[in-house]
Image: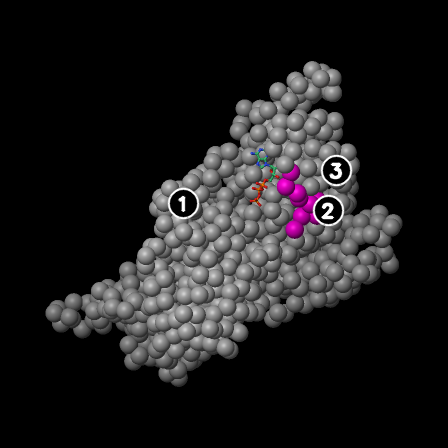
Amino acid sequence: TFEFSFNNDNVKSVKKRIGLLTSGGDSSGMNAAVRSIVRVAISQGCEAYAIYEGYEGLVQGGNMIKKFEWSDVRGYLSIGGTLIRTVRCQSFREHKGRQQAAYNLIKNGIDALIVCGGDGTLTGADTLRSEWPGLLKELVQTGKLTEEEVTPHTYLTIVGIVCSIDNDMALTDITIGAVTSLHRICEAVDCISSTAFSHSRAFVIEVMGRHCGWLALMAAISSGADYVFIPERPPEAGKWKEEMLDAIEQQREAGKRNTIIIVAEGAIDDNLEHIKADDIRKLLVEAKIDTRVTTLGHIQRGGRPCAYDRNLATLQGVEAVEAVLRATPDTPSPMISVRENKFVCEPLMKAVKLTHQVAEAIAEKNFRRAMELRDPEFSAGYEAYLSTTFMKNKAPSQANHSLKIGIIHIGAPAGGMNAATRAAVRVAINHGHKPIAIYNGFSGLLNENVRELSWLDVDDWASKGGSELGTTKTEADSLELIACQLQKQGINALLLIGGFEAYSSLIKLSKARDKYPAFCIPMVCIPATISNNVPGTEFSLGSDTSLNAIVDGCDVIKQSASASRRRVFVVEVHGGNCGYLAVMAGLAVGATNIYAPEYGLSLKILQEDVNHLVRRFGADKKRTSSGRLILRNESVSSTYTTDVIANIMQTEGQGLYDSRTSILGHIQQGGSPSPMDRIRAKTFAVKCVHFLEKHAHFSDPSEKTKLPEVYTKDPESVAVIGIIGAKIVCTPVSELELETEFDKRKSKKAWWLNVKPLVELLSKWGYSDNEP
Ligand code: ATP
């Protein structure tokens, strides 16, 4: 969830000049942040000054500090790295350099600075702010500036936005660029896995992260890697080699051909000895396993940002401008951070200090503290990784309360369905249960198309798109036959993975409990649908994969439109009655407008958009502007179809531009699931098995009741798992029914509704009648 507080009432009468720079290592999404800062600043009556090459530009001044207009950030969203560039600047570390920086800022009338970078960048900015009054005094004393020049700028406002592929900053759950980097790593590991399988090889893959194992751990979770080394959880010095070899040999004996080991560049043992990729390779070669090392290197910087980073950076840019406008001389410099999926300001230097404490804790061998300093999801992710990667040798204690867990896919395929199944199967086996695959939905169940899955059956499912079990859109209709089959197969816990059909099936089964005892078992649904319309979660599996597929498609379309300069594309996207995909993709691609059911569509809206396009293309005498996209949800209107809208746009444009349609169709299901969907899949699945265990009430055999072995009618035992805020929660369907619009097949809640005005503002404001 991105809850942001942007509102026009905050416009201050003072016309502030806001400087912005990118510094430190580049990360994907920096450009999206710059675009957002520039455009929001202008829309709020401020001026935006881009400072090229980070602090170097600040020290050099001159044409390294450039006033940016609305159109200067055109096309920025989809470009990786930083277009306003970054260099590591030694002179800014020295007092003299900062004095020169202060001089250049005053000369440009800038007294607010938004810095995008890592801990070094934030520290540098804070140092400049604390020295500011002294620096101004020196500049006046040396005659470089006059009292009149410095008086309007007695204090410097600093706001930090954290851009780092490592996701290593404390007090924020995620940093800009980390998810794109994870995309690149997963793509690489997926490629390597297939060659590893072909040749029965092991690969040791080194990923970035000196003091932070986030990338390594998330890559291991996403790719289903066989072993991971991260700095926060160093293995025992005397033991790790043997342990790793045992684990890998055990997997190979079980029939596995490929071995993937992910090692963070800063991996160590608990004696702080560096564990190098090549050391691991040598060990495996000695064990007669053909092994290669791949160091991913700078490919991890990311390139084209993924949808998540574009939206994260855009929304953080909005918050940063707001924070500048709110700032007072007494408030500590804020860092825009994401906590519990909401944007908050945290004291910048507190975050930097805590970040340094991780490295200090590791250096002091206080690994527990290092782990605590990471966000709680990090250690939960680590535990989930272990529980789905290593098979327990001994039968667990719950074995005498073993469940037969039926796993079924329902509805259209969505990225992450297989990853969720893989994780559920493995946790179930490790807990002494039997995972039973039900193939081809409920019709498969009725045809007795069921089979117990083994640990290795699901080995390579983490990265597979589609549905390995097969899925149908049929809801649970023939209840009597379903009950009969569940009983016959001995299934006493049910995991449904799917979209709205899965949710409504769950409701039907739970309502029929009085009639059919076979449904008096714990049942839980993992929402998996690209539309993101299932109640009980802010994100369903598959929605992130789909968002990326749409963004990829739109980037290509936009490029083709740019070639002719004057073209409007009306792009039709999926989502049923839910506008989530249209809105969030619209934000990520810089759409001119979004037409979705939640907002309605009328002739008046179309007229306003035509007016905007005529103004925009009309003002562009040099024909430098790029093509425009309008994202239309498939169900927004039966009158204003995609074709009709395109025709209206073209006719009303009177030759200023032309228009085309594009229907993305099933491409939107995406191929291989995105890392985000894979990670969510694992988290959901692990918790779902715990849920089923918790709600499985085993009857006491000594009581000789006629009840089945597992029997519960507790309403809490039928639930949908989901992400709400930053929490993973199971909400009983009895509660969710109240927040469901059954006729529209969606939740009444939509956290993303207020994103649409921002999409319009970011793409249209500079060309509206309000333009200064
Ligand atoms: P990354 O995480 O990619 O390394 P970073 O922002 O930490 O990003 P640094 O190279 O440490 O990258 O810092 C960027 C710039 O910030 C430096 O080149 C320097 O100009 C400035 N800087 C860093 N630390 C300080 C400091 N203590 N005082 C003044 N300036 C600093």
Q: Secondary structure at mark 3?
A: helix
The quadrant where residue 736 appears: bottom left
Residue at screen point 38% across, 74% down = 252
The residue beneath circle 3 is: 64
**x then y, percent, for residue 652:** 82, 57
The magenta span reads: 81-89
Q: Secondary structure at mark 1?
A: helix
Q: Amino acid at mark 1?
A: Ile
Mark 1 CB near ligand 1 (8 Å cut): no
Mark 3 or 1: in front is 1
Q: Amino acid at mark 3?
A: Met
393 w.r.t. 771: above or below: below
**x then y, percent, for residue 726:** 44, 49
630 w.r.t. 336: above or below: below
- Image side of residue 625 versus residue 13, left or right: right
The residue beneath circle 2 is: 73
